[in-house]
Amino acid sequence: MSSAENAVTAPSTAAVLREVRPASLPRPALVENNRSFSWISDKICGIVEGETPSWWWWCFGVACFIASFTVAGLTYLVATGIGVWGHRSPINWGWPIVNFVFWIGIGHAGTLISAILCLLRQKWRTSINRAAEAMTIFAVVCAGIFPVFHVGRVWYAWFLFPLPNSNYIWQNFRSPLEWDVFAVSTYGTVSVLFWYVGMIPDLATLRDRFAAAGRVMRARIYGFFAMGWRGSARAWSNYEMAYLILAGISTPLVLSVHTIVSFDFAVSLIPGWHTTIFPPYFVAGAIFSGFGMVLTLMLPLRAVYKLEDLITQYHIDCMCKITLATGSMVGYAYAMEFFIAWYSANPYEGFTFINRAFGPYAWAYWIMISCNVITPQLFWFKAVRRNTTLVWVLSLFVNLGMWFERFVIICTSLTRDFLPSSWGYLSPTVVDIFTFFGTFGVFSVLFLLFIRFLPLMAAAELKAVTPQADPHAGHHHG
Amino acid sequence: MPEQPYGLIATFETTAELYHAAEKVRDAGYRQWDCITPFPIHGLDKAMGARRSIVPRFSLTGGITGFCTGMSLIWYTDAYDYRLTVGGKPFFSPLFAFPVSYELTILFTAFATIGGMFFVNGLTKLYHPVLKYENIRRGLDDLFFVVIESADPRYSPTGTREFLGKIGGRDISELEA
């Protein structure tokens, strides 16, 4: 519309709007069934205060058993040598680095939910942010295992940090691998701090409830971590400012972490890695995989603890839509990589991509494509998003597909570099498989401990998004 | 001589009641007072006439320190203390030092922000007179309180009690110091 036309229609638009009186569309409720403040406290604290359910012990036992695979795999590795991972020239980055990137990526959804959605004032984040942040931290723990043990002599892993040592030599800060050390350790630390600060008010609620119930030991432990929080409005004002700043710095942090992870690849000269699309492509993939994992974790929790009033269909819809958006970005990146490989007219680059799709790892490539490109597209349909079981199954495909994405990137490029004399094929060893399988146990053990002993949802934040929390409820102006 | 109490506490049942009461306490000219709420109430700091939080100053200091630490660490280790030749690249350049300095900026900002928030709020102090009030746990559950301290120049045991009643406060009680 031209500006002249605009000027003519502008006043009449207002008149028309007055005439038709458009219906005000109610926002979907974030806490359903008009729950009261104390209902929210009881619901969330009740999980921590109640008796340990028998399913928890069963899951915990199974998770410990699975985690023992990682312990066994790593013990054998340390006792024998890194050769048990089946790494040999040219593939010195095999499964461990695949697993590292996979787990780090999972963590990104937690920070996205807690930081980016906080800055964008997406209030639906409140019921899932605590668990998603816990997921981030535990995923970083699982991720950290791999590079630390991949250094070979794990007792020298502290060489990664600039600490004075008897060789008088320092780290090479020109290497993206060293940048990664700082990125991942900062990410882990800031995620823990953010998670803990968010939990302080709820820990104080638990402290008071345990004290009232006469459970002194528990009250003292929660009280210690609650740091004497008492809900003072002046403290809330500083707290909210601090929380906002943490969200503000976590946003560039989460984007930088996977960017730097992608530098590990992109700064090298290996065909298929040496591309500028890697940082945004890795970040989108990380968020995509992370939301896959959030759905995988939250849907069963919602069913087990009957949290349907707090994690509503609206929340699931939102998560599915983010998965769809980031999944489409990932799909676009796959297509663009292929296009650029051809357009660059670089024979090595072109060969790498033809080899990815039709070479010895074609099976992995097509698993990746079907899981990451086709699966998320199903979230266009409301019927799919409303079918919780189906959403859960699709989220598993997302997790699977994103593991294969890293596998494809690492293995196809390393097994086919410039000289055919250095070509190879990587098959994982039993130790590889055990160690990776076990990390799901490590993750589950930590997550089960979290849901048993810590407030699963941000109760204070949930209260703040209920209608009765608005001091001007009923008489809105403007 | 009986000890001076810490102050008076009054209970409010809804967010709106507390909000309007806070405006009235502010307008009455009290300075040493506070509200206790189970969650942050949007706009309450304005209703209380509170100043903007000073936490960002800590954050900024932390961020600058972090960035300088990163840059100087890399310069000191790779270009001064032990010069390491790798691939003919310069011993120091702000370009390759940037990612690490960037991460350290964020790390130090996070610590400074949280440390600053703890300091300003007097957290890690596990005790406060308000915590002795028997119903205080509802302040982290579903009730709202206004506390006026006896240290306030306008405080008077009877006048302040009357005032709290007039603005809608219930169960007004004295807090032990």
Image (cartoon, coloured by chain):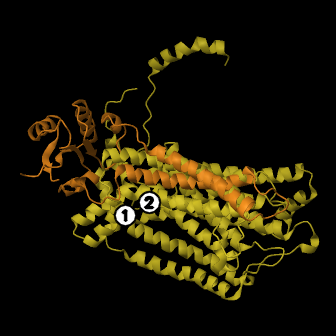
Chain colours: A yellow, B orange
**Dot 1 or dot 2, earlier in sequence:** 2
- Which residue is depicted at the point 61% across and 51% down? B67
- Which residue is depicted at the point 26% across and 62% down? A209
Of the 4 image quadrants, the one containing the N terminus of chain A is top right
Q: Which image quarter: residue A437?
A: bottom right
Farthest residue, direction left: B1
Judging depth in this view, the residue of A471 and A9 nearest the camera is A471
Q: Name the residue under label 1.
A: A225
**Residue B33 at x, y percent in the picture:** 24, 42
* Amino acid residing under circle 1: Phe
Of the 4 image quadrants, the one containing the C terminus of chain A is top left
Can you see residue A465? no
**Residue A76 at x, y percent in the picture:** 65, 87
Whether marks 1 and 2 lie on the same chain: yes
**Residue A308 at x, y percent in the picture:** 41, 56
SS class, disc 2: helix
Q: Mark 2 points at which residue?
A: A196
Residue A162 badge: none
Q: Residues within 10 Å of mark 1 (few under 14, many from 20)?
A: some
| Above or below for A378 versus A439 | above
Q: Contact, CB < 8 Å: mark 1 with mark 2?
A: yes
- Which residue is depicted at the point 33% across and 43% down? A469
SS class, disc 1: helix
Q: Is residue B145 left or right of residue A169?
A: left
Judging depth in this view, the residue of A222 and A395 nearest the camera is A222
* Amino acid residing under circle 2: Tyr
Q: Which chain carries label 2?
A: A
Can you see residue B14? yes
